[in-house]
Amino acid sequence: MIYSDIPAAQTLVLYFKSKGVKNIVIAPGSRNAPLTISFTKNPFFNCYSVVDERCAAFFAMGMAQQLQEPVAVICSSGSAMLNFYPAVAEAFYSDIPLILVSADRPSYGIDIGDGQTIRQQNVLEKHIGYSANLKQDVSHATHKVAKYGKDLLEETQEDIQSHNEKELAKALSVAFNEKSPVHINIPFEEPLYGRVEAPSISIKSEGILEAEPVEIEDLDGLIEMWQNTTKKMVLVGVNQPNAIEQSILKALAEDDSVLLFTETTSNLHHPEFFESIDSIIAPIEKSKDKDSLFKDLQPELLVTFGGLIVSKKIKAFLREYQPKNHWHIDTKKAYDTFFCLNKHIKQDPNAFLKSIVTETKTSSNYKSHWKKVKTNYEQKRDAYVKQMPFSDFIAFEQILKTIPKGYQVHLANSSTVRYAQLFPMNASLKVFCNRGTSGIDGSTSTAVGASVHSQDPTLLITGDLSFFYDSNGLWNRYIKPDFRIILINNEGGGIFRILPGKEDTEEFETFFETHHHFTAIHLAKMYGFEHQQVNNETDLGESLQHFYQASDNPKILEIATPRTLNNKILLGYFDFIS
């Protein structure tokens, strides 16, 4: 094995190895050469090269999302690390253990006019679990340190080594225990390319301390409230597949006092669950009896778990018609999304639900009424699909019912994830979406990173703006032949035609909708994808029959839909089921 001759670089590598952080994504550069040398020359690590730092961070986040363990991404100094920030924010709000490592210039080289230097220390602090600022070694390039940074010599190399080890230990503890992104900043002085065959230091590594389980106060009282409440709503946001035991789901499904609302990203399935929230709420919004119907739907107890919710309608409803009690179950945090949170249950949702959900059911007609509403909108949705012309709505209905079993499905944000909420998906599919910040900026990169360690094939469903924005996400060597992209191209930000404020003006098309005439054919050719484009329902159906078949190259199926018709058909759907 080969190591950098710089102690701080050796220390980082030895700490990562001792804690089992083995997946390393590297954005090429010079200042991070000591790290690149040390990681790539050590067979313990799996190293990946991704040129674009923003894409590299999302790629690493996709890996961490799938593996449920820390993954590191490394960059050079200067503005390179600022490109990490979108993925940092997403990881922060989605509780993904991403480790950001930035190589830095010596402190005496900052703000003196040198190139590729910015104030890197703590630059991510607003959206990070911990910022570890390592100190520059004084045993390396000592003559430069003595000439330009004499104050650094006030500390011995032993003191610096001790500080750096403590900082790394803290950062890795946060990454492992809190599932938070952490930032490690390391200053290096030139020369950067020196190598040794064995490390010159040894580390005093200790094991990662496991977080102590939190005892629930007044569990008996919570169980009593659960059993005595006749209108309980369980609302689940972004949730890892297979996180909740089937026996618990079955018990919840059979309780007539429970309405369990899921979203596509919840990865929970049962015929008794309500998977299209907006199809329940939108007709009420249009009803003359809106207030009485919302009061019928209003829960006495709201129980939430999982990540952020897609549906704006459920948020608006619960903020206006608040439950008497709102519990959120999460080991780490509880957002007061509906402004009525009164209990944060700091436990794993599966463990807590197992303790309160029993075979004893509460007598209630809460669910039976809304089951009839659900059956009604499902029948009307089927009827609506049969009479509508080709559009985004029709395309999504076709796509979601033809995805092969067992696929890992990644949804881009904006229109894509919202259309997906309107239709059922096979229970064998594992669905993901970057809902922490809900940005379109890294959907492709995240899906590619997530596919690397997945045993199952991966499908990315994306809109045109998200796809073209993150097209550098295809610029790497790690896309597998079974990777599939379905691109809905409606020539702009179609969601803006649905939102209030739509205008038929040149300014609206340019600055909101961002109307364009691009297709993916040239990107597909450049990155080695098979490409097919369709623009009607018949051709789409035929293409989907062959799209998932084995191939030597990944594939893009581009679906052109009518830009000015999509919004009318979607809004018409809610009128139709009302």
Image: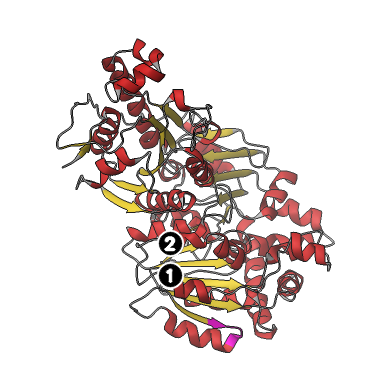
Query: Magenta includes 307?
Result: no
The image shows residue 279, relative to residue 261, as above or below, that is below
Residue at far top of view: 154
Picture quarter with the N terminus: top left
Quadrant position of residue 506: bottom right
The image shows residue 443, relative to residue 203, as above or below, that is below
Q: How far is disc 1 from disc 2 in space, using C-alphas?
A: 7 Å
The span shown in magenta is 533-537
Disc 2: which residue: 475
Query: Magenta includes 536?
Result: yes
Q: Which mark is residue 148?
A: none
Coordinates of residue 502 in the picture (x, y in percent): 80, 63
Local secondary structure at mark 1: helix
Q: Is residue 546 visible?
A: yes
What amino acid type is highlighted by mark number 2?
Trp
Disc 1: which residue: 527
Foreground: 191 or 318? 191
Residue at x 45%, y 29% (from the top left corner):
131
Foreground: 576 or 131? 131
Coordinates of residue 495 in the picture (x, y in percent): 69, 63
Describe residue 480's horizontal placement relative to residue 566 as left or right: left
Coordinates of residue 293 in the picture (x, y in percent): 76, 57
The image shows residue 241, relative to residue 549, as above or below, that is above
The image shows residue 154, relative to residue 454, as above or below, that is above
Describe residue 274's horizontal placement relative to residue 549 as left or right: right
What amino acid type is highlighted by mark number 1?
Tyr
Coordinates of residue 539 in the picture (x, y in percent): 55, 88
Asked if marks 1 and 2 touch (Cβ < 8 Å), the reply is yes
Foreground: 269 or 551? 551
Describe residue 578's horizontal placement relative to residue 346 as left or right: right
Picture quarter with the C terminus: bottom right
